[in-house]
Each structure stands twice: as C-alpha cells, then as structure tokens.
Image: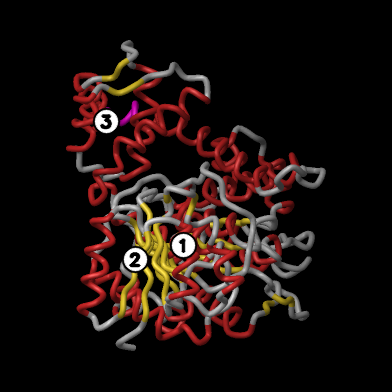
Amino acid sequence: MSGARVLVVDDDAAIRTVVREALRREGHLVETAASLAEQRRALTSFAPHVLITDVVLPDGNGLDVVPETLRDHPSLPIIVLSAQNTLATAVRATEQGAFDYLPKPFDLEELARAVESALATRAGAGDAPHHRQPGDELPLIGRSPPMQEVYRTIARVVANDLTVLILGESGTGKELVARAIHDLGPRGARPFVAVNMAAIPRELIESELFGHERGAFTGAAQRSAGRFEQAQGGTLFLDEIGDMPAEAQTRLLRVLQQGEFTTVGGARAIKADVRIIAATHKDLPRLIAEGGFREDLYYRLNVVPVRLPALRQRADDVAELARHFLDRAAADGLPRKTLSAEGIGRLARHDWPGNVRELENLMRRLAALSREDVIGVAAIDQQLDGQRHREPDAIAEGEEGDLAQSIETHLARYFATFGRDLPPDGLYDRLIAEVERPLLRLTLAAVKGNQLRAARLLGINRNTLRKKLGERGIDAADVRKMG
C-alpha cells in the first residue's frame, strides 16, 4: 500500500530523520513526533495508518500507552522500537497489543517490511488478548541479535496454542524456551510436563506417553496415567523428538490429527487438552530422507519453528550469562565471585561446544573452587584445561554430582508448576516410582535380563526385585530383548 500515512515517534532526532527518509523512499507519507504529547496530537491531525513508537520517551513510556491508543484507534497497527532488548520487552509489547516489536539497532529494510505487513493486515487488526505481565526475572538471558529473533518468535506464540518445534544444539536452552512459552501464556497456571524421548526405552514410550490400563501387559498391576493425561490443560514438552521410535510417531500423529488418545489397553477416547512443544538437536529433514522420521509428523510439529543459536554465535551474551550464573551460584550457597575484564574476554573467546550448559557448569565450578574473589584468566584456563583432560574416574565422580544437581533442578521446577499451591499428597511414592522404573529397566538391560545379576548390582534380593518389577509394570522378558 503505497502512499500510506506513517507516524514515527522517537526522542532521537537522528532516528526520526533516518526512518522518515527510508519510508518516504518506499512511497509513504511520514510525520514524526518526539514525545507522547506530540504523538496524541498527530494521531488526531495526521490520522496515520501505522504508528512506529519508541519505548522510552521524555514524557512517558511508549509501551504503557499502547492499550490507550488501541482503544481510541482499534485498527491502528503499532510497531514498537526498543533498546531494552529483553524477552520481557518483546512479550510485553505483544501483550499490550503491539503489531510487531523491533530491537534497536534495527535494519531499515526489516522495518519497511514490518510496515508493509502491518498495512496488509490493518483491516483485520483488533485488540490482542491480555495475560499476566511477565516480570524481569525470565529464564532467557541475552541481548544479542540472534536472541532478539528468538524473543520475537516467543512473543508471537505465547498467546495461542500453535504447536512449536524448538531446534538447536544440545545445551542451548530448549527446555527454557518451552517453559517461557508455557509460563507466559494462558496455560501458565496449569501443568508443564517434560519428557525426554531419548531417555525412555522404545517398548515403554507408548505407555509413558499415553498411560496404560490394568492388565494391558504383563506386570501392569494397576492403571497408570501417561504424560498426556498428566499435562491436561497445560503443556507437554517432547524433548529429543528425533529419538521417538516409528510406532510412537504414528500414534502421536494420530493424537495431533484427532485431538484425542486412548491408553494402552484402553478403549475410551480421552480428549487431549494440551499444547505440544517439541524439541530436537537432530536434523529432522535428514532423518526423514533416511526413513527415520515421519514427514507428515514433522509438518504437524513444525508449525512454528524456533531456532536457538549456539553460544558461539552469540558471544556478546557470554558476559551477562556468566554473571547471572555466578549470582545464582551465590544464591545457592556457593562463595560470591565476580569476573575480571580479562576473564570476561577469555570467556568470549572460548568456542563453547557444550553451549550455555557448559558455561553454567564452568561458573559453578569456579565459584566453588577458585580461591580469588575476582576470577581471572588463569583460573578460567585451569578449569577449561581440566575439563578437557579429566580422567575417566573423575568424570564418573563428577557425573554423580551432576545427577544430584539435575534431580534437584527438576524437582524445583515440578514444585514451581503448582505456584503457591502444593502437589497432591503422596509425592514421595510417586517420585520414587518415577525413579525406580527407568533404574530397573536400564539395570536389567545392562545385564541382559539376568535378574540375579541385576539384584546384586542394585544391592537388593531377587524377590524384592521381582516384586518391584511387578509394581512398576516392567516385563523382564521384553527388557531382555533390549540387551
């Protein structure tokens, strides 16, 4: 739509001039304003088709007046510009009703495209749904351009139930993105259930996801709710979806198509009132070409892709992330440490093959082991060299500590899903069952199904092992086939 009227509001005269001239070259009529007061006058006198506004203005906050502006001009698309490049700003802009959000510094061609998109959808614009306001304490940290794209995508999907596929290397924070989408959306007060496809033996995935009825298979002594049922009303996060076996892929596709599922051994259809968020570090198109993943399921899952950058692609964020992890380590009782300027430079030069997870673990080690209050290059190099050259025994010992930390993290997240409430009574037995089931399965698989050897390895007698296998619905014969 050439010749459209565009109002640009920014207290920086240089930005007003650059944007005005760029949009005029696109054929638009452009007026500018330097404050909210000037904006209100121009909305009446100029009657723009699109409003572009900064957040921080001399007489107030541009975001705060977006609802007021939309109330008086409901069909006016508003594009927000901001140097406060955080997830909170992106999500708040969307929740306030803004059509789009662009972080500063922005690309003029991208701004022109945003204006054209706003004009194309202007006739159908209306009030955006409002949800709880996100605070500053959000799980995603970083202001680099690659993260801005992630924030913008998250902001566009939090208010709806579109299926999201999160792509990225291991350690980039895929579950954090899934949690942010859940927590900031209308399902935020309901359960967030995460399940890792790579951690479940193939023969138990369907039971794990959809539950089973009593007597559905050998050892199924009682009905068990699956992850879909546990997540009802909330979000089901399917991590490492590329590791899902073919049979479970077919069943998941049916659920996505029909919106309902049945338990293993059950006949009654159960409505699947869940939002699906999937994630993988694998190349799904390549898996499809090799016959390892269903193409139709891929398109069902890949409605909105979110591509997480590797940490080496967002080196500008390393310092902020490192400080955050040191602060969190101090909050957990470790000594409070800071980083020297040289230390920050050393971190920025590292290639981070383990991504954000590697950085977090390094900061925790430095907080625990460094003798200096200010961490410098020498301490960082010592830990990085030790990480590369640890002996196998040291790695095994470290992994036990990582396991305890991982369990504590997951339990904290589980409690957090209930907000101010508490989980249902009987928590101990439920959690012990969740831990015992994979422990028994993996132990039996490791010893080729030999129950006597498994009992010795676990430190329990054979009768106790048999009893636990029955309680947890584990068929030793099936597990033996895995070995």
Q: Is residue 392 magenta?
A: yes
Residue to which mark 1 is pinned: 154
Magenta span: 390-394
Residue at 64% x, 55% y is: 132
- Which of the two discs, 2 and 3, sits closer to the camera? 2
Label 3 packing within 10 angstroms: few (<14), some (14-19), many (20+): few
Count of picture labels: 3
Is residue 238 shown above or below 391?
Answer: below
Label 3's element? helix
Q: Amino acid at mark 1?
A: Ile
Label 1 packing within 10 angstroms: few (<14), some (14-19), many (20+): many
The answer to which quarter of the image holds residue 380 is top left
Residue at 68% x, 72% y is: 273
Residue to which mark 2 is pinned: 32
Residue to which mark 3 is pinned: 387
Residue 466 position within the rendered picture, expressed as x and y whole percent measured from the top left: 69, 48
Q: Could you tell me what secondary structure mostly forms the magenta stretch?
A: helix
